[in-house]
Image (cartoon, helix red, strand yellow):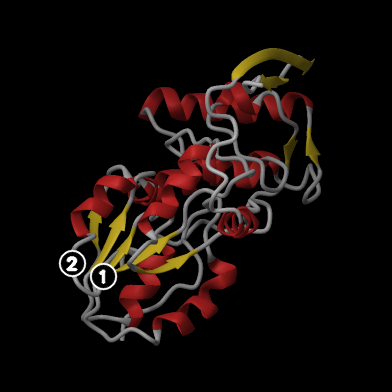
């Protein structure tokens, strides 16, 4: 029996560790041998759990965010974190701000790593030295934030068996969907970035239409779909279902936009839409 992980080996925004046990219950309704396609593979946790429980199933893991590349560099990441851990020592209490010369030494060590090896796992690094749930993808962006001593006391396990047995692809979810949509009995695992949440660490840009496009893969297929109450996607679909004849009320209207700035790094776009119907 292979080891089953209930959380991903490395930090990943939106991994489903809190729903892992409930997801396992859902999988019980499908026979071993079912084809599962994880369209938004993320950390690979859903794919890993599925393959662990359904060893005779083919499980397609769409690693669009290249999580396996991060895992490959776990030894390098552990060494970087070990060096930062040694720098901090007992000089800064846990979860307290790192300031002054020590802060600059940490940035110098990160820059040295990036210049010498060409790679830094900024997502994993962020979880150790930034405020909880803040993730930055460069030293430049990290410098805009306060550093905190949230450094793990031990390194990350390499978990070489974590992705074992999965068929791994890396492409747009629509391409993966079209490849498998006509196979009888296929089950799609659908865990897109959530609407109204930060998607800055994903290898994609999403707007409202992108979130709604995902719903096309649900029609006529078995699926396990994930969302949150932040997205209001269920309420939106329920409302559309009750107002099927509305169509697009903004069709053929005129739109006026105004770019508003709240401060140096925060802005939004105000919109005015108008249409005069024939009398």
**Which label is found at residue 186?**
1
On the image, the x and y values in percent for residue 55 come to 25, 80
**In-image side of 97 versus 228 (left or right):** right
Q: Farthest front residue?
A: 279
Residue at position x 55%, y 54% in the image: 14
On the image, the x and y values in percent for residue 9 come to 46, 60
Q: Evaluate if marks 2 and 1 touch, with contact meaning CB atoms under 8 Å apart.
A: yes
On the image, the x and y values in percent for residue 130 come to 68, 40
Vertical relation: 263 (above or below) 203: above
Disc 2: CA contacts within 10 A as few (<14), some (14-19) or many (>=20): few
Vertical relation: 211 (above or below) 271: below
Of residues 112 and 9, the one drawn nearer to the viewer in this rendering: 9
**In-image side of 211 versus 71 (left or right):** right
On the image, the x and y values in percent for residue 46 come to 42, 67
| Displayed quadrant of residue 258 | top right
Q: Quadrant of the C terminus?
A: top right
Disc 1: CA contacts within 10 A as few (<14), some (14-19) or many (>=20): some
**Which label is found at residue 183?**
2
Question: SS of the residue at dot 2?
Answer: loop
**In-image side of 191 versus 240 (left or right):** left
Of residues 276 and 127, the one drawn nearer to the viewer in this rendering: 276
Residue at position x 68%, y 58% in the image: 229
**Which label is found at residue 80?**
none
Residue at position x 24%, y 56% in the image: 168
Of residues 219 and 25, the one drawn nearer to the viewer in this rendering: 219
Of residues 212 and 114, the one drawn nearer to the viewer in this rendering: 212
């Amino acid at each position: 029996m292979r080891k089953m992980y209930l959380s991903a080996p490395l930090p990943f925004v939106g991994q489903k560790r809190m729903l892992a046990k409930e997801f396992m219950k859902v999988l019980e309704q499908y026979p071993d041998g079912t084809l599962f396609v994880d369209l938004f593979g993320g950390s690979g946790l859903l794919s890993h759990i599925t393959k662990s429980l359904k060893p005779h199933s083919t499980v397609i893991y769409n690693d669009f965010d290249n999580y396996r590349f991060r895992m490959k560099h776990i030894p390098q990441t552990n060494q970087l974190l070990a060096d930062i851990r040694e720098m901090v020592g007992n000089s800064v209490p846990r979860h307290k701000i790192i300031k002054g010369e020590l802060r600059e030494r940490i940035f110098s060590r990160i820059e040295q790593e990036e210049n010498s090896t060409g790679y830094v796992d900024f997502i994993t690094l962020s979880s150790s030295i930034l405020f909880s749930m803040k993730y930055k993808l460069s030293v430049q962006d990290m410098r805009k934030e306060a550093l905190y001593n949230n450094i793990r006391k031990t390194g990350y396990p390499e978990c070489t068996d974590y992705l074992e047995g999965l068929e791994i692809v890396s492409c747009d979810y629509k391409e993966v969907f079209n490849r498998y949509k006509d196979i009888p009995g296929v089950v799609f695992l659908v865990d897109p970035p959530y609407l109204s949440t930060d998607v800055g660490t994903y290898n994609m840009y999403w707007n409202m239409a992108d979130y709604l496009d995902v719903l096309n893969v649900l029609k006529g297929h078995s699926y396990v779909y994930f969302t949150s109450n932040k997205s209001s996607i269920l309420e939106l679909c329920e409302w559309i279902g009750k107002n099927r004849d509305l169509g697009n009320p903004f069709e053929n209207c005129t739109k006026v936009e105004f770019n508003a700035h709240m401060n140096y790094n925060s802005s939004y776009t105000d919109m005015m839409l108008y249409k005069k119907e024939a009398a």
